[in-house]
Image (cartoon, grey):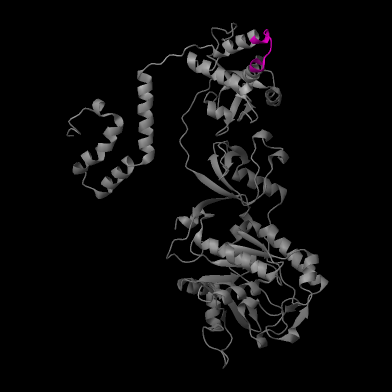
Amino acid sequence: MPALSTRTGSELGLYELLSVLPSQLQPHIESADDRSFLCTMFGKRSLHSLVKIHEKLQCYEDRTPTPVLDSAGSLAQELTEELQGRIASDEIRELLKLLSKPHVQSLLSAHDTVARKSYDPELPPLPDDIDDEEDSVKIIRLVKNKEPLGATIKKDEQTGAIIVARIMSGGAADRSGLIHVGDELKEVNGIPVDDKKPEEIIRILSQSQGAITFKVVPGIKEEAPKEPKIFVKTLFDYNPAEDKSIPCKEAGLAFSKGDILQVMSQDDATWWQAKQEGSGSLRAGLIPSKHFQERRFAVWRPMTVTQPQRTPSKRLSGLRRSFRLSRRDKKTNKSMYECKRSEQYDTADVPTYEEVASYCRKHGDRHRLVVLVGPTGVGLNELKRKLLISDPQHFSVTIPHTSRPKRHQESEGVEYHFISKHLFEADIHNNKFIEHGEYKGNYYGTSYDSIRSVLSKNKVCLLDVQPHTLKHLRTAEFKPYVVFVKPPSIERLKETRRNAEVILGKEDKSSSKSFSEEDYQEMINASQMMENHYGHLFEKVIVNDDLITAFNELKLALRKVETETHWVPISWTHS
């Protein structure tokens, strides 16, 4: 490489050298991106400030300054004793008060430490009674503060030795770099632990204050491969204080359903190490592993295939209102819903953790599907209607399919997509419908293609479905944002729905009725069932106490979905 300047690097100084380096290198760099990168890197103010600090320190070190004395603390003590024997004047009292202040004493102590250059911690001398043939040992002293030491121990079943089982990422033991997994613990504060149970040793540690001394035999240290960053969304609540299985309750990490955790280690098949994302804490805590928690859930509540709750015919005559049946279709009759089934999903979907990644919709990308879920009568249709009215160019709904004949006042693709019964049955067989049902020999249903049609027009598709269909919509294609609309308390329901009616037939007053006590209770029960079984799939919960308030909350949430970063299943970002 050609000389950078006629002056040598030592004559130039590091700061000057960095300043001229980009211009000197430019003729030798062909790529415009590389030139831009160099200019940006060398032009950063932080780099220039760092170099200036380096040069100042280098200049200071070249002068090799020496302290006037390295015993300022003891000198202050002697001065205090001398002054206390004198007749106290205001000046002496003020000086004595100043020298007795803790922060002044700490400052003098720090001065002496730096002056003596005694930066290393003082370690206790090695014990005299170490057997020459004994394995090499380490004497480790850690200062215990309010946080746990961040290590767990176990008893080796074969040898009976007390072994360090895990080191919590970011904890005191991890930061010290002195204790490692596999180390054998011999003594704690001079107390042999060979004949003690792990619980007894933990008790000794919990009762110890200040510095704790460990005598350990180093284990074989293996360089663990660096694990990639893994983030999970928690689908259940966890409190380590109530967990009888956790090896150390103090080391556990409590979390609530919906929290985002960064998994720091999965070395242990039973207990992972994780920390709360965004908390700023460097210290990890123990959480049950996915496999372990799934096994526990299977024991606590045997898995059953949850069938969708049927709404009694007196509450909903005909099919779902989202199919928008006409008055003549909405005569009193029992109906049912069907959707594509996944037996494997139904029997194995135990909510524990879901691996997630951050996602923000880019300009030009399709909108996320918005799915509204809630019990009958809670106000889903009213919320959809208000959204459509507020911005019909931005929001839209699907058009359902039917096999019944088109009437003279109806248009294809407006009220329904009209198809033959044979074609409808073929589409059912090919799993093209999210939900479908049969009424008086005619089929009605909502198809996946009807969602795609809305999204392809760069509109937000609003859809309300039964919650058991959510699992079929949770794909990278639709990226559904699921909003659960729940009722307020039964007392508030009675107050706000006093003059409302259950509409059993659209614009058909003969098929509407006032809410009864049973209707209120059934709405509450259905809401609780949905939240218990499908709550881990909900990204937003809105209590429809007041329709205007609920609408404003929903509209704000949907605006954030389009503009802000959210956590979504990792599979949605890899498509």
Residue, x 54% and y 11% (percent of image)?
71
Residue at image location 54% in from the left, 7% down from the top: 132
| Residue 315 magenta | no
Most foreground residue, 316 or 112:
112
Using the image, determine if residue 405 lies above or below residue 51: below
Q: Is residue 91 magenta?
A: yes
Q: Position of residue 359 (x, y in %)?
A: 49, 56
Relative image position of residue 472 (x, y in whole percent): 56, 64
Q: Quadrant of the C terminus?
A: bottom left
Where's residue 311, x and y in %? 72, 72
Residue sitting at 57 percent across and 74 percent down?
390
Range of the magenta residues? Answer: 83-92
Quick one: quadrant of the N terminus? top left
Specify whether 25 is left or right of 61.
Answer: left
- The residue closer to the viewer here, 372 or 557, is 557
The quarter holding residue 317 reads bottom right
Establish if 342 lies above or below 188: below
Give the image quarter of residue 199. top right
Residue 122 seen by the camera: yes
Residue at the bottom extreme, as displayed: 408
User: Where residue 525 appears, x then y in whole percent?
Assistant: 76, 64
Report which quarter residue 276 is drawn in. Answer: top right
* Residue 479 in view (yes/no): no
Query: Is residue 349 placed above or below 110 in the rendered structure?
Result: below
